[in-house]
Amino acid sequence: MLKINKIYLMDCFDFLNKIDNEIVDLAVIDPPYNLKKARWDTFKSHKDFLDFTYRWIDALIPKLKKTGSLYIFNTPFNSAYILQYLVEKGLIFQNWITWDKRDGLSAAKRKYTNGQETILFFTKSNKYTFNVDDIRIPYESTERIEHARIKGIVKNGKRWFPNPKGKLCGDVWHFSSERHKNKVNGKTPKLPHLTPKPLDMIERIIMASSNPGDLVLDCFIGIGTTAIAAKTLGRNFIGCDNNRDYVSIARRKLASIKN
């Protein structure tokens, strides 16, 4: 078994082969999408991509505890295949989360422009962690909610008062992409990774589906966002990537976080 709270320069299959079974509380996976944006994201065919995807899923599932949770990022098209495969493997579907990236408009002229990615949320059983109050979000109608705080709102014969932590989190998430969050003089800069996920979005996942001291795994960890979020939130982590530059950046970022 590899040591936890480390990021390894390893192939995902070699990495998962060295992880003990049923020790992972939460897996947050941002794998290749086959969008051909880089060598690591390019496959000869859609079948080759799916074969690769199903292989790492098969290697990952045994590592999850029976109470474990799994989140997988991908395109909506690919996610349709991945969802069916996870169901066939006996995992339990919880949510199809739509990430509204607010990333500007694509160049599509013969279909609707693409502005979303999918996050599949599955669990290994019906007994799993979900900290619903930790991920509440602000109410939208502030004036109406302020009134309700004082007098409440009658619903179905009962008087309802807003939760001081906010409303329940839905399955459509509004997070700006990292490249838009880091604009310089109105221009999007070149980032060290092509597709980094927003830190605050990964933090939401970790807060919802794990507790302090739990183990969070990411076998395509890139520049370390999952590990950084886990460490900041008091969780343990373990991850890998086969890109030496990404791993170096991730390790430097982790080293800069004070416990």
Image: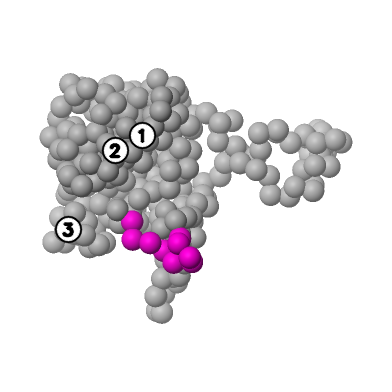
Looking at the image, which residue is at 41% across and 24% down? 259
Position of residue 149 relative to residue 173, above or below, is above
Q: Is residue 214 left or right of residue 34?
A: right
The crowding category of the residue bearing disc 2, from other C-alpha atoms within 10 Å (few below 14, some 14 to 19, many at least 20), is: few
Q: Which residue is mark 2?
A: 252
Residue 147 percent coordinates (x, y): 84, 42
- Comes first in the chain, label 2 or label 3: 3
Query: Was residue 188 drawn as part of the magenta stretch in this picture?
Result: yes
Badge 1 marks a residue whose secondary structure is loop
Q: CA distance from mark 1 to mark 2?
A: 6 Å
Q: How is the image coloured?
A: one colour
Residue 54 percent coordinates (x, y): 21, 44
Q: CA distance from mark 2 to mark 3?
A: 24 Å
Q: CA distance from mark 1 to mark 3?
A: 29 Å
Looking at the image, which residue is at 46% across and 44% down? 201
Range drawn in magenta: 183-191
Residue 99 percent coordinates (x, y): 46, 52
Q: Which residue is mark 1?
A: 256
The crowding category of the residue bearing disc 3, from other C-alpha atoms within 10 Å (few below 14, some 14 to 19, many at least 20), is: few
Q: Nearest the camera: 241 or 244?
A: 244
Type of amino acid at the residue the image marks with label 1: Ser
Type of amino acid at the residue the image marks with label 2: Arg
Q: Which residue is mark 3?
A: 39
Type of amino acid at the residue the image marks with label 3: Arg
The crowding category of the residue bearing disc 1, from other C-alpha atoms within 10 Å (few below 14, some 14 to 19, many at least 20), is: few
